[in-house]
Amino acid sequence: MMNTMTTKTTVAIAVPLEAELVERIRAVDPSVTVLYEPDLLPPERFPADHSGDPDFRRTPEQEERYWDMLNKAQVLYGLPNESPAGLARIAGSNPRLEWIHAMAAGAGGAVKASGLDAETLQKFKVTTSAGVHALPLAEFAVFGILNGFKRSAELAQDQAAKVWPELRTPTRLVNGSRLVVTGLGEIGLETARIARALGMSISGTKRTVEPIDGIEEVTDNDGLPGLLAAADAVVNTLPGTPYTEKLFGREVFAAMKPGTVFVNVGRGTVVDEEALLEALENGQVSYACLDVFAVEPLPQDSPLWSHPKVMVSPHTSALSAAENRLIAERFASNLRTYLDGGELPHLVDTVHFY
């Protein structure tokens, strides 16, 4: 990717963003023109609502202005209309397009869903916001571990029933316990950092097996069952790919020691939900904290909704009030790299789509 300080670069803001954050992007370099027309963007319903109000409709004149704005840019902040269809349309209508920065950490799914062929996908780069969500996801993962160890589900049930148990049931200590993290990327390593602060020892998986400071043992997914035998808790951060689909199936759950706490903040397709329900029933898994599911929204007839040992979170654990600022700061840093002709980080892999 070639760019210089003297080349004029146009960035178009395709998704809702606060004006003060747009100014941070403008401030990256005087050679950058930022196109931003907030009246063409749906209002946010909550912080970092990248899709905006679903009832928002542009007039035909506004729709023409929106796409005209996007077609003038080499760089887009956000997928058009925050959708795979918008990505497919801009890929066909903007021959000068060089780079799109997606709001999601797992934008590979949207790129795949756009249906664009390999040749078209080679014409521009798509970067993700991976890493921006690492801290809130890690905090949620540790929250799930603590819930499982401290019996929060049982406490809530007793409170709702106004029951004061005759037997005082002890909880489990997090300190001194063992955690396995599948996917030692930015989210996994941030989870490990917080877990170590609580006194846990950490092992985990990584596609490229290599020593990592603070991690006792690193293996690939083939070695996962060997790690699970000693684990007290497991956190999945893996993306959804053909290589990870239903990784957590009957054999892997059977490899866990009884009473394991399971947390999923990766992708729902990594877990065979029938196998998870069996593991909950037979005691291999004592508690499951799930932010992601194979089908989303979670179908009304899913037994996970009402299972007494399951917390259902509606794929919101990555959200935080600071998200827009963090993504804009990440984009501004990437924009500086782009202008200097460097390699953009967190590129979507257009073969495996993660």
Image (cartoon, helix red, strand yellow):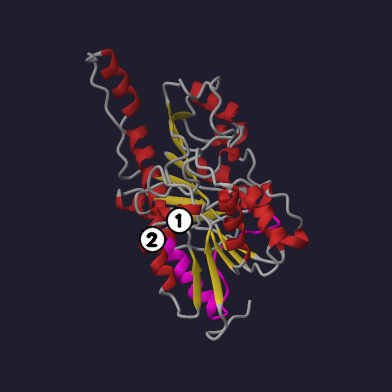
Callout 1: few (<14), some (14-19), or many (20+) C-alpha neighbours within 10 Å?
some
Left or right: residue 199 versus residue 213 is left
Q: Which residue is mark 2?
A: 19
Residue 20 lies within the magenta run: no
Foreground pick, 348 / 31: 31
Picture quadrant where residue 80 is located? bottom right
Depicted 252 relative to depicted 11: above or below: above
Label 1 sits on a secondary structure element that is helix
Q: Decide: marks 1, 2 in contact (CB < 8 A)?
A: yes
Residue 34: x %, y % from top left: 49, 69
Q: Residue furthest front?
A: 61
Residue 352 lies within the magenta run: yes
Residue 47: x %, y % from top left: 38, 48
Q: Which residues are magenta?
A: 328-353
Label 2 sits on a secondary structure element that is helix
Residue 306: x %, y % from top left: 45, 20
Callout 2: few (<14), some (14-19), or many (20+) C-alpha neighbours within 10 Å?
few
Q: Which mark is residue 77?
A: none
| Residue drawn at (51%, 35%) of the image | 256
Residue 89: x %, y % from top left: 68, 54
Nearer the N terminus, badge 1 or badge 2? 2
Q: Amino acid at mark 2?
A: Ala
Q: Which residue is mark 1?
A: 38
